């Protein structure tokens, strides 16, 4: 019996999930230290925060799609696809929640 290989799509989805985590941490670190670029005097968030937040959202969406494709590949181990779905799915949820909060703060 031939040993199954790991899904390449799963590995890529895990990488995108980890990049999403790194982007989100970097976004909050930059937003916390450079408040004058992200916050208007009365506390409203500027559009600059959306531009810095956008890569996190993109990485999480791509990672979620790739992990779903990794689950559909036959004769492959699905460990990395599951990990990619956990990372990317959680990042997608956190990204959407953060985006909704930022949208509420701008209005």
Image: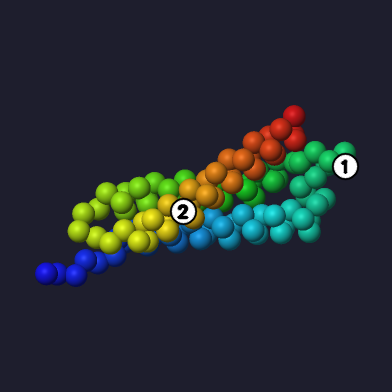
Which secondary structure, mark 2? Answer: helix
**Residue carrying label 1:** 41
Q: Residue at x 62, y 54 (%)?
A: 24
Is 42 situated above or below 9? above
- Residue reaching furthest to the top: 107
The image's mark for residue 85 is: none
Q: Residue 56 at what x, y percent from top left? A: 56, 51
Is 7 situated above or below 57? below
Does residue 90 appear in this view? yes
Distance of label 1 from label 2 (alpha carbons): 38 Å
- Residue reaching furthest to the right: 41
| Left or right: 3 in relation to 102 | left
Q: Residue 98 at what x, y percent from top left? A: 64, 43
The image's mark for residue 86 is: 2
Is 39 situated above or below 32? above
Q: Residue at x 25, y 53 (%)?
A: 73
Q: Residue 79 at what x, y percent from top left? A: 35, 61
| Left or right: 91 in relation to 77 | right
- Residue reaching furthest to the left: 1
**Contact? badges 1 and 2 (CB < 8 Å):** no
Q: Residue at x 45, y 61 (%)?
A: 15
| Left or right: 11 in relation to 101 | left
Local crowd at mark 1 within 10 Å, few (<14), some, or many (≥20)?
Answer: few
Foreground mark, 1 or 2, reads 2
Q: Quadrant of the C terminus?
A: top right
Which secondary structure, mark 1? Answer: loop
Q: Residue at x 70, y 39 (%)?
A: 102
Q: Please tell me which residue lies in front, 105 or 77.
A: 77
Q: Please tell me which residue lies in front, 74 or 49.
A: 74
Does residue 55 appear in this view? no
When asked about the image quadrant of residue 14, the answer is bottom left
């Amino acid at each position: 019996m031939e040993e199954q290989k790991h899904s390449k799509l799963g590995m890529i989805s895990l990488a995108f999930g980890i990049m999403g985590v790194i982007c989100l941490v970097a976004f909050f670190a930059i937003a916390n230290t450079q408040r004058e670029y992200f916050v208007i005097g009365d506390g409203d968030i500027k559009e600059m925060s959306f531009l810095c937040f956008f890569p996190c959202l993109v990485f999480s969406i791509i990672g979620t799609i790739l992990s779903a494709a990794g689950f559909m590949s036959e004769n492959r181990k699905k460990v990395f696809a599951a990990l990619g779905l956990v990372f990317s799915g959680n990042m997608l949820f956190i990204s959407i929640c953060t985006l909704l909060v930022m949208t509420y703060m701008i209005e």
